[in-house]
Amino acid sequence: MNEAAPILEVEGLCKSFFGVQVLHEVGFALRPGEVLGLVGENGSGKSTTMNIVGGVHQRDAGLMRFDGTAYEPRGPRDAQSRGIGFIHQELNLFKNLTIMENLFIERFPRRFAGLPFIDRGAMRARSAQLLREVDLELSPATPLSRLSQGERQLVEIAKALSAEARVLIFDEPTTSLTTRETERLFGIIQRLKARGIAIIYISHILGDVMRLCDRIAVLRDGHVVGAAAKSEMSIEQMISLMVGRTLDQMFPLRNTAPAADHPVLHVRGLTQPGVVHDISFDLRAGEVLGLAGLMGSGRSEMARILFGLDPYERGDIVVTGEKLARVSPAACMERGMAFLTEDRRAEGLMMDAAIADNIALPSLREHSTPWLRLVERTRLGEAVQRVSRAVQITAPDIQTMLVKHLSGGNQQKVVIAKWLLRNPRVFILDEPTRGIDVGAKYEIYRLINKLAAEGTGILLISSEIEELIGMCDRILVMGHGEIRGMHDRTAFDREAILRSAMWDGLKEAM
């Protein structure tokens, strides 16, 4: 255990918004070279706490000390000047600028003191040094738009290091990263730790928290409900502390079975050169069919083709017994299909609109008068209220509250609710639990089981093999745009599924 004096101390932190107290005497200490894991459900107070530490919000009560002296940042620049870097989940970078311009946008080096001439040579040299520190072998003049999400995150880390950060806060850093990019990030975190930089690591992926962190603090409803060394904390204990109850199982039991010979989705020979090749499968009524595969395997691309968002060259798509001659989102919706995109913020929601408006949007036609197409607001409003209660969206008023103010789990429930309003027969779910906490995951799993029990066929795409094993009747494995294997629930095996995903040959399975 690191016994050095704390570099950051937080005591009795309290914060309210609009009269509602969201933090109740939160406290923790962070030492140089230590990784502190901060976990909790969405809405538990993690982000509010870190936004106060990072100078985004001001505390109502409590004390903070940095390096033994009082710490009261009046804004993010104050926090940066004291040595605190914040790597947000939504990266604060400009895609239209180069790497080095992003690194120094707040403090361009001057060629002559007092004159507005940028020393681009010094900026390029310092940028190259910072990129080497984060293992990013790119020219500082590379436009940010050419970088992957993982590479952009490394630029964000380099930006914090350029300000000589002594504390780095990582907020859900692996949400959009590939496995390789995640491993690269973990290696850099270990090196930063060895240099004496203190790190706060916020994540819903509890296995990563156990792997990286020295100590773990658990928040629930704005309170610190548990804090201990990693050696004294298990994943089961974390889950129990986070949700306030013991989860006997990570995945709820489902007592219903799929219809034996009743496919609601029939796909044969689906091919789009360079994307998918000769995809064939059936999805039965009441079945949860999993789709596994490594990043780039073609899972999401296939889902987009099935819903008419992307084109395909040949193949047959039959929905509820009718072949789709012209596949488009409108045609798919007409036949009873629904699609939950993996990027709920950019593609699944209108972030600046109210919850009720988001839920109602796909069903306006069905709730309009036949001739004049006037929306029957009373009937639609009742339906929206009914479905929002069914998915248990946590919000004071769905008519006025904007979706952007919801937690990730509640945002996902809004996306599910808008499709439930259409009573789908086929529901494609692409990474439905990505970036949400364990309690919200459990609620979404229950919704999936309820849909299956009502006869909806569900295609569940997930990067978490444990999630697929816990929820699915069958699992298809994709690789390089092809189906490489099919695994039945009676013979689920994690290693066998991984072998199917990693095998370069086509496995005979169907």
Image (tube, rainbow, N blue to C red):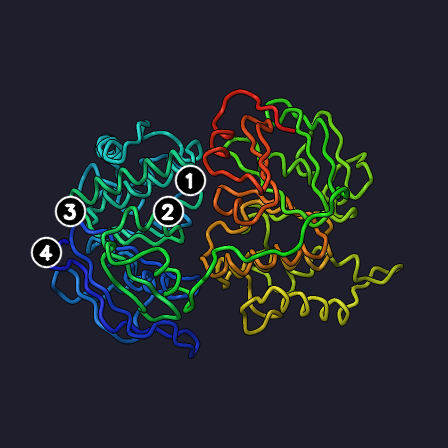
Identified at 27% across, 76% down, the residue is: 61
As drawn, the residue found furthest toward the right would be 371
245 left or right of 62? right
Which label is found at residue 177?
1
Q: Residues within 10 Å of mark 4 (few under 14, many from 20)?
A: few
Which label is found at residue 4?
4
372 left or right of 378? right
Separation of residues labelled 4 and 1 (CA atoms): 33 Å
Mark 4 or 1, nearer chain start: 4
Determine whether the residue tagged by mark 3 lies in a helix, strand or loop.
loop
Mark 4 or 2, nearer chain start: 4
Mark 3 or 4, nearer chain start: 4
Q: Residues within 10 Å of mark 3 (few under 14, many from 20)?
A: some
The amino acid on which the numbered mark 1 sits, given as a three-letter code, is Leu
Determine whether the residue tagged by mark 4 lies in a helix, strand or loop.
loop
Q: Position of residue 30 (x, y in %)?
A: 20, 58
Q: Residues within 10 Å of mark 2 (few under 14, many from 20)?
A: many
Separation of residues labelled 4 and 2 (CA atoms): 27 Å
Q: Are the residues flagged by discs 2 and 1 in contact, CB closer than 8 Å? A: yes
Separation of residues labelled 3 and 2 (CA atoms): 20 Å
Q: Are the residues flagged by discs 4 and 1 in contact, CB closer than 8 Å? A: no
The amino acid on which the numbered mark 4 sits, given as a three-letter code, is Ala
Separation of residues labelled 2 and 1 (CA atoms): 8 Å
Q: Are the residues flagged by discs 3 and 2 in contact, CB closer than 8 Å? A: no
**Residue position for label 3:** 196
Which label is found at residue 173?
2
